[in-house]
Amino acid sequence: MLNFDKEAFMKVMKGAVNVKPEVDKIVKSVTEKGYRTLFLVGSGGSMAIMLPFDYLLKAHSTIDVRTEIAAELMVRGSKFLNENAVVVLSSLSGTTKETVAAAKYCKEHGATTIGLVGELGTPLAEIADYVLVNYSENDFAGDSIYIQLFELLFGFMAAKGEFPDYEEMMEEFKNLPEALYCVKESCEPKMSEFAKKNKDETYHMLVGSGSVWGETYSYGMCVLEEMQWIRTKTIHAAEFFHGTLELVEKDTSVILMKGEDETRPLMDRVERFAEQYTEKLSIFDTKAYELPGISDKFRKYLTVLVICTMFEVLSKHLEKERDHSLDLRRYYRVIEY
């Protein structure tokens, strides 16, 4: 596999799975204290990574969940941000300015904070009331954070009696490292082909829905735009027919990121339209890949994790074919702004 260290990947994935005992302690402590509102807060990619759980909680739980962009939350405020609120924040480096500032802001308003970081001793780790830590390279950060968020947020659902299969799913999570590796290995030929074919493409439409929408938004913003400097439009499948469809021509690149949750029919509708009007339709469907050791009944929850691990493979091939390092930036963390 291109520029892929399996040993490092497996170590990070197993580390994420193994935070479960600490998750149990946090869920027990927070639940015993009591809370009314759950905030999911982040900046950029770390906010986008919360969106799948906003969807999953709204679809399968009565927990009052509010997903916020850190900087906006601090200037706007929220009447729900008080001693009855729990706030989940993530930052791999533990240093993201807006996220660290938001953690301070939330604590000042009495909320309980839970931080997900890649290293102890960092600002977010020092500020948060509870910390989950799993070292990860940027290459695998999405997989790692997603696994921990599944453990934590489905743990809160289970504590309310809303996900009775929680422990069964967590037991199967032990199979995730190998299962995700199998997905990467299986999808690589398709990702290599796409990168070669589209290396000079200057504009892509990315379409997603449901629990995959956050990853769609993130991939367009954080990878294609930030890391590859490619103009990108990310659009929710439910909104595609309210404006964006007018920009589709026969040479427009349309990329569908299809998952397996309740919103799949929305993606099918976009697919039916796009296949008639563009010759550059690319479909990446999680349903095409096996997850060894994971029961079918859990697949619809994990679809975002599958799409994430697939597109990490694509990033490496785009980097190679475009001769454009994923680490190259003009402005982000290069200049003051």
Image: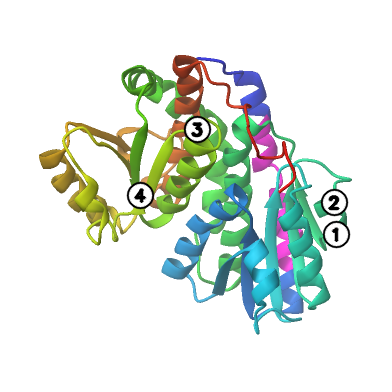
Residue situated furthest bottom in the rendering:
79
Q: Amino acid at mark 2?
A: Pro
Disc 1 versus disc 2: distance between alpha carbons?
A: 6 Å
Residue on which the image places disc 4: 208
In magenta stretch: residue 17: yes
Q: Mark 3 or mark 4, which is nearer to you?
A: 3
Quarter-of-image position of residue 119 = top right
Classed neighbour count for the residue bearing mark 4: other residues with Cα under 10 Å, few (<14), some (14–19), many (≥20): many
Q: Quadrant of residue 77?
A: bottom right
Question: Which residue lies at the image location 71% right of the left edge and 46% below the top edge?
Answer: 19
Q: CA distance from mark 2 to mark 4?
A: 34 Å
Q: In the image, what residue type sits under mark 3? A: Trp
Residue, x 64% and y 76% (percent of image)?
76
Q: Nearer the viewer, residue 229 or 291?
A: 229
Which residue is disc 2 drawn over? 123
Boundaries of the magenta span: 12-29
Secondary structure of the residue carrying tag 3 is loop
The residue pinned by badge 3 equals: 229
Determine if residue 258 is in view.
Answer: no
